[in-house]
């Protein structure tokens, strides 16, 4: 066998390997979020909105997807800077119970990198300033203009604590930390200015347009279409209509047997609260009763679409309501309605504070 017959196939093999690796890298860079990123985003959004009902499930999903215990801890600690200590502490409490329950079942979750609490750096302000300058690709004067001059302490906390003490920890990468931040800001109203800023920072850390597009769906699922549309608007995606063509509006006219009235009201309240809290497609379930005749109950029900209504019928809380109240209902009439003004519908109940 001559030398050329050995070298040429070998070179061809190297070219094929290189091409395959480049194609894989390109695919990965242009793809959406992987399972770990999806769960990290969902955990952040649910923590920011205070939705502890769904959070426990997603925390389990996060660990199942490969997130380490310390990665999730770090995300929840970081979130105190964006949604406050109470929601951060509530989420950490739930996560503690999740970890303990899984350990009791024999599930061995990965602890992950060690969390270092102390930051030995002498000039933490300068450390944080450099981190922010690095990830924002923007010069960071000292003090920060505007709010930094007006309230120097908040500028110090921002640099010394958030971008030094928290961001310097390598338990999460800068990209992961920005995914946490963007997800939290996208989930809560009134912070679009900060969201825009962190979208730019996130891209600097390597978050792609495709990943931000995928994040829109996660925000819609866990924080609603209104919030998802704010994110869509800021990442160049088309906003989706707030009401679907097959949105369902229904009034349930129910007469309850007097001897079961108080028991029925308690069961109905539990079911309606659970439906609105955990079902994204349930826009409203609003029970009422006539003042002069309290056994006459009326329920305004609004579902995002027919699919959401059908999913509602299969939920454990609705099945429990139906089974336990069957003997209490004297009569039932379901009246399907059409909305006269779908544009104003998103404002329904918003004025109640």
Image (cartoon, helix red, strand yellow):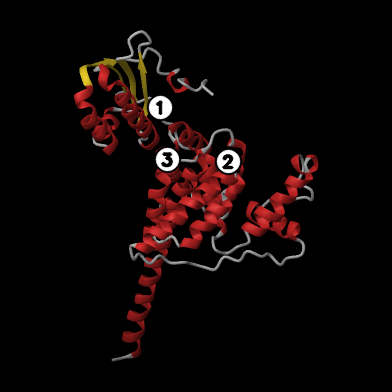
Q: Which mark is residue 241?
A: 1
- Residue at image x 38%, y 67%? 108
Q: Secondary structure at mark 1?
A: loop
In depth, the one of 340 and 29 nearer the eye is 340
Vertical comparison of 178 with 20: above or below: above
Q: Quarter-wise, where is residue 241 in the image?
A: top left
List the residue tagged with mark 3: 222
Mark closer to the chain start, 1 or 3 = 3
**Residue 173 can be seen, yes or no:** yes
Vertical comparison of 275 with 133: above or below: above
List the residue tagged with mark 2: 195
> Mark 2 touching mark 3, by CB under 8 A?
no
Q: Residue furthest front?
A: 259
Residue density around tag 1, few if under 14, some if 14–19, many if 20 or more, within 10 Å: few
- Residue at image x 50%, y 39%? 49
Q: Secondary structure at mark 3?
A: helix
> Mark 2 touching mark 1, by CB under 8 A?
no
In depth, the one of 27 and 8 nearer the eye is 27
Q: Residue furthest bottom?
A: 1
């Amino acid at each position: 066998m001559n030398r050329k017959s050995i070298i040429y196939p070998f070179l061809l093999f190297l070219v094929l390997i290189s091409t395959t690796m480049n194609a894989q890298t390109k695919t990965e860079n242009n793809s959406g979020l992987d399972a770990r990123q999806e769960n990290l985003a969902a955990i952040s959004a649910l923590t920011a909105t205070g939705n502890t009902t769904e959070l426990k499930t997603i925390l389990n999903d996060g660990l199942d997807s490969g997130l380490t215990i310390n990665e999730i801890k770090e995300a929840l600690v970081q979130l105190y800077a964006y949604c406050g200590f109470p929601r951060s502490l509530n989420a950490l409490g739930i996560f503690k119970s999740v970890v303990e329950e899984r350990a009791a079942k024999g599930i061995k979750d990965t602890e992950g990198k060690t969390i270092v609490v102390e930051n030995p750096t002498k000039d933490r302000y300068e450390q944080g300033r450099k981190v922010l300058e690095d990830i924002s690709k923007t010069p960071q004067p000292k003090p920060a203009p505007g709010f930094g001059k007006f309230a120097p302490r908040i500028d110090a906390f921002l640099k010394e604590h958030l971008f030094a003490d928290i961001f310097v920890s390598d338990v999460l990468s800068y990209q992961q930390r920005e995914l946490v931040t963007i997800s939290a800001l996208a989930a809560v109203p009134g912070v679009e200015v900060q969201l825009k800023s962190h979208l730019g920072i996130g891209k600097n850390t390597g978050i792609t347009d495709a990943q931000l597009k995928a994040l829109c769906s996660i925000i819609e699922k866990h924080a609603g279409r209104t919030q998802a549309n704010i994110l869509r608007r800021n990442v160049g995606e088309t906003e989706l209509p707030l009401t679907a063509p097959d949105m369902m509006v229904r009034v349930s006219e129910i007469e309850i047997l007097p001897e079961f009235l108080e028991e029925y009201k308690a069961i109905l309240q539990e079911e309606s609260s659970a439906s609105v809290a955990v079902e994204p497609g349930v826009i409203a379930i609003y029970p009422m009763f006539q003042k002069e005749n309290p056994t006459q109950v009326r329920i305004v029900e609004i579902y995002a679409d027919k699919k959401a209504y059908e999913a509602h019928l299969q939920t454990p809380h609705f099945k429990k309501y139906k089974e336990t109240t069957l003997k209490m209902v004297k009569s039932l009439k379901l009246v399907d309605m059409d909305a006269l003004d779908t544009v104003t519908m998103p404002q329904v109940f918003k004025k109640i504070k």
